[in-house]
């Protein structure tokens, strides 16, 4: 039995990295997947084809979760296409790193808008169908940086910490309707983005992690499967660190 058999999931920002990894594992576990991308239409189409080949229904949507009306239109389109929504994964995010003294107002606003406002927009948009169904699982992709902070990432840390406060509040608001809301805080996850980093830097990071390796998108996806499935029916308002022991 597949853990997500027949469930419908929306994953934002899924054309690459962690989002793409989650989409693939969800499809393997039987979920139908609607995912968003911002600009990379080619990789989105490739992912859509790869997911559909697994025997589930998948569709990519070019949509900006940071735009309130875009988010609501997306949810309406997904319900029209898939019939319902069982799981929302708020994964879309960007970084614009700099020390505070060099950080522009625009770089602060943009990160908050895409990383945090998008979570408000999408959660508000799916709330209606989940309330109607009296069930649902909302999973917010935070970061260890949102838990402990990081020099040069005040904007990113603020957005990811804000996501945790939002998660706990929504868990309290929607718990009585059997809608759960949890956050995942990934540590050093190796993706296309980290592949561009200096190998010595990456090696240093790996050495500092108790499990002595970086995480994979699948490591994060497997925790999403747990939180999206009935296995976590009594888990809400939590932040699960997927960091190889980094914050232990």
Image (cartoon, rainbow, N blue to C red):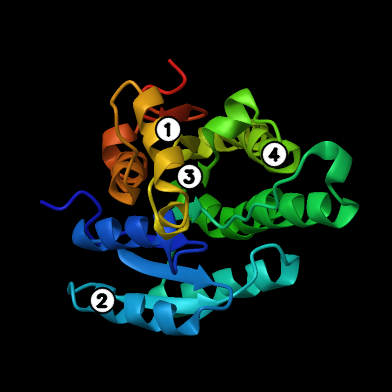
Q: Nearer the viewer, mark 1 or mark 2?
A: 1
Q: Secondary structure at mark 2?
A: helix
**Inter-mark Cα distance, 4 to 3:** 23 Å
The answer to which of 247 and 199 lies nearer the viewer is: 199
Q: Nearer the viewer, mark 4 or mark 3?
A: 4
Q: Residues within 10 Å of mark 3 (few under 14, many from 20)?
A: many
Seen at 70% across and 47% down, the residue is: 97
Looking at marks 1 and 4 on the same chain, the residue that comes earlier in the sequence is marked by: 4
**Inter-mark Cα distance, 2 to 3:** 23 Å
Q: Secondary structure at mark 4?
A: loop
Task: Give the number of the disc on residue 205.
Answer: 1
Seen at 45% across and 51% down, the residue is: 194
**Inter-mark Cα distance, 1 to 4:** 17 Å
Reply above or below: 203 against 248. below
Quickly name the residue at label 4. Answer: 153
**Inter-mark Cα distance, 4 to 2:** 34 Å
The quadrant in which residue 71 appears is: bottom right
- Residue 108 drawn at (x, y percent): 81, 49
Looking at marks 3 and 1 on the same chain, the residue that comes earlier in the sequence is marked by: 3
Q: Nearer the viewer, mark 1 or mark 4?
A: 1
Seen at 34% across and 50% down, the residue is: 217
Task: Give the number of the disc on residue 139.
Answer: 3
- Residue 117 drawn at (x, y percent): 72, 52
Quickly name the residue at label 2. Answer: 50
**Inter-mark Cα distance, 3 to 1:** 27 Å
């Amino acid at each position: 039995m597949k853990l997500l058999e027949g469930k419908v999931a929306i994953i934002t920002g899924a054309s690459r990295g962690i989002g793409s990894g989650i989409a693939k594992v969800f499809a393997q576990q039987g979920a139908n997947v609607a995912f968003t991308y911002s600009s990379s239409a080619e990789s989105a189409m490739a992912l859509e084809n790869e997911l559909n080949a697994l025997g589930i229904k998948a569709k990519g949507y070019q949509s900006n979760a940071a735009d309130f009306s875009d988010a609501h239109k997306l949810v309406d389109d997904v319900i029209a296409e898939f019939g319902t929504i069982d799981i929302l994964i708020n994964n879309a995010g960007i970084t614009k790193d700099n020390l505070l003294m060099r950080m522009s107002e625009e770089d602060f606003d943009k990160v908050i808008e895409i990383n945090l406002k998008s979570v408000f927009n999408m959660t508000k948009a799916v709330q209606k169908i989940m309330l109607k169904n009296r069930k649902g699982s909302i999973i917010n992709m935070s970061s260890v940086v949102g838990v402990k902070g990081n020099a040069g990432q005040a904007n990113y840390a603020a957005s990811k910490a804000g996501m945790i406060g939002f998660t706990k509040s929504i868990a309290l608001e929607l718990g009585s309707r059997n809608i759960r809301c949890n956050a995942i805080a990934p540590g050093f996850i190796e993706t296309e983005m980290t592949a561009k980093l200096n190998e010595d830097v990456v090696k240093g990071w790996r050495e500092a992690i108790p499990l002595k390796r970086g995480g994979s998108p699948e490591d994060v996806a497997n925790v999403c499967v747990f939180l999206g499935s009935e296995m976590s029916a009594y888990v809400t308002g939590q932040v699960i660190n997927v960091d190889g022991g980094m914050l232990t």
